[in-house]
Image (cartoon, rainbow, N blue to C red):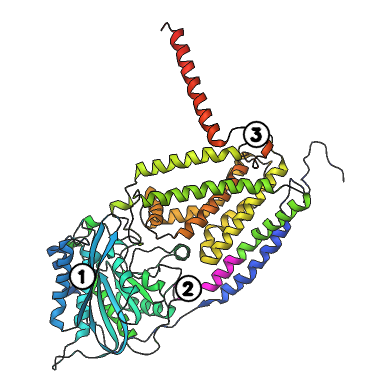
Amino acid sequence: MTVTPGTRRRPRRGTLERPVDGRLYRSVMLVVALPLLALAFGVARPGALPQPPLPPSFDGAAAAQLATELATQVPSRQPGTASASEAAQWFDAQLQPYHLPISSDTWWQTIPGLGRVRLQNVWAVAPGRSRAAIVVMAHRDDTGVGPGADDDAAGTAALVELAREYANVGAGGRPVGSAQTLVFLSTDGGAYGGVGAARFAARPPFPIVAVVNLTAIGGHKPPRVVITGDSPRSPSAAFLETVRRRVLEQTGVAPRRSSLLDQLVDLAFPLTLYEQGPFVARGIPAVTLTRAGERPPAAFTDRPNGLDVPRLTALGRAAQEIVGSLDQGEALPEGASTYLWTGARAVRGWTIELLLFALLLPPAVAAVDLFAFCRRRGLALGPALHALRARLGLWLFVGAAFYVFRWLGAWPTGVARPPDPATPVAGDWPVLALIALALLSLTAWTVARHGIVRRRAVSDADCVAGETVALLGLVIVALLVLATNPFALIFVLPALHAWIWLPRLRRAPAAARAAVFALGLLGPALLVASVAVRLQLGFDAPWYLILLAAVGWISPTAVLVTLAAGACAAQLAAAAAGRYAPYVAPRERPTLGPIRATIRGAARAARERRRVSTARHRAFGG
């Protein structure tokens, strides 16, 4: 073949310029077609439980009056305060005329930003023919900033009104029996991550069939159903379809829900501020009915004159209808499963997991093939592995320092629940502690860099070896993620699919390499953006994620996997920036160790600054 002078030939496949086999990657990509087919056939249309025979009689005006009374008499209901105890007594007093057995659970809990406080759950029971319980719940506390008329005096008042309806005291003074036991639960600590709900879910006095949580139901926005759990699970599809239909029948509009992308993020990183979460995580069908967004309404706008009585009535009657459908005693919803909910249809979770696994295969196979290429060409992988080990050691040191700072009390600590974004602890960055951690990390990096700094020209073979080891490390991270929560692969897959091409871009312009590397960061960026936008945290989102790790909501195992991913990303970033170097050989190491070399270098720099200062002083006639 004749090559025109001045033209640039494309590098031959299988050389150091094209070490990644693009045809193999594309061939394996065809495997994704099968999960897509399964996804198409995995869409189900669940049926709903039958409608109750009697029309709802929920009195919204009476509930609004009770909400106004609670918000006016006890406007500050922050957990652990005397006002919180007064609110619990108020709830107890409202239920006394209905002659329902009332129980309570009191305990002490450490809450981030509040310290160790006394909490109390209170519930009334309408006994049924079955001991299995349908729980209707609302939290009665607030953050202490405002009266909390909608969040959640309205839900608490609706709870009292529903208890009155289901008590239904007859001439004999006994409540009319229901098929299921009905529990009307008023939780404490709901404004601080659902602490009371987590307590009740962990030690329920009854076997629980389903849970309906009422939060901020008296606002002006359209109704919404929240289904996110504390683990990658979803409530029963039949239960959700029942909720959707009852809300549609009573309000005239289908309830809003999170978008498909937001639902996928919720499965990948389960995080909810509402109280259905602990129950869903335990396989109990549970939902929250609300008119608020992902974040409850602002305290300064949450006043009694803002309650919308017709909308409160509509959602209260929808809750009553949902309980009535569940109380039919036939075909009760099964436990929690996993799926994405769209309209009246549900996309089964196993089909999504299969698709994510299939999307993992192409970059994983390409990375293994890249490793085989390095072995065939005799490329030295040992120094690259040692370089990755040095970076991993640095990241693990930073993680260990983070937990040492936690043990020393530098970060807010307490119960492992998501803190309320409206509380100061979610926005007040501990600046001094973060600076101290940053300085400690910088010192560790200064020491670690002596083994991975460039001391000579680095060949293409060395760069390919370094990228290969980092990509294989990232594949191992992806497999760990797959073993713990397959949905969390959405945070890793962009990096694998983008960075697998970095070995072919060493001769490309720096801007192109930087763009490809940035493309791989879309996964973590999606998580941060979701927390920032949906919880209205803005630039406080990174600190909120750190706070979740500090309180234990993000497990140490997840933190460890994240640090390992960070080490792999750091090595690939160095390669993309043209700064990568394999770990230095013994003969290339300086005579001084890294700590002594750092101290001596700092001393020399200080002496040089003093010499220059003295020379300038003398030059100007000092």
Q: Which residue is mark 1?
A: 309
User: What x and y, as percent, mark residue 117?
Assistant: 23, 61
The answer to whether 220 is drawn above or below residue 509 in the figure is below
Q: Which residue is mark 3?
A: 455
Quadrant position of residue 278 = bottom left
Whether residue 46 appears in magenta in the rendering, the answer is no
Give whichever of 79, 449 is nearer the camera: 449
Residue flagged by tag 1: what amino acid is it?
Answer: Val
Q: How crowded is the residue under tag 1: few (<14 C-alpha within 10 Å), some, or many (20+)? A: many
Whether residue 353 appears in magenta in the rendering, the answer is yes
Q: How crowded is the residue under tag 2: few (<14 C-alpha within 10 Å), some, or many (20+)? A: some
The answer to whether 507 is drawn above or below residue 525 in the figure is above
Q: Which mark is residue 338?
A: 2
User: Mark 3 against mark 2, which lies toward the viewer?
Assistant: 3
- What's the magenta region? 341-357
The answer to whether 434 is drawn above or below residue 614 in the figure is below
Give whichever of 451, 173 is nearer the camera: 451
Residue flagged by tag 2: what amino acid is it?
Answer: Thr
User: Mark 3 against mark 1, which lies toward the viewer?
Assistant: 3
User: What x and y, as percent, mark residue 560?
Assistant: 50, 56
For marks 2 and 1, the one nearer the N-term is: 1
The answer to whether 548 is drawn above or below residue 323 in the figure is above
Question: How far, Cα to Cα, is label 3 from label 2?
Answer: 52 Å
Quadrant position of residue 548 = bottom left
Residue extending farthest to the bottom is 172
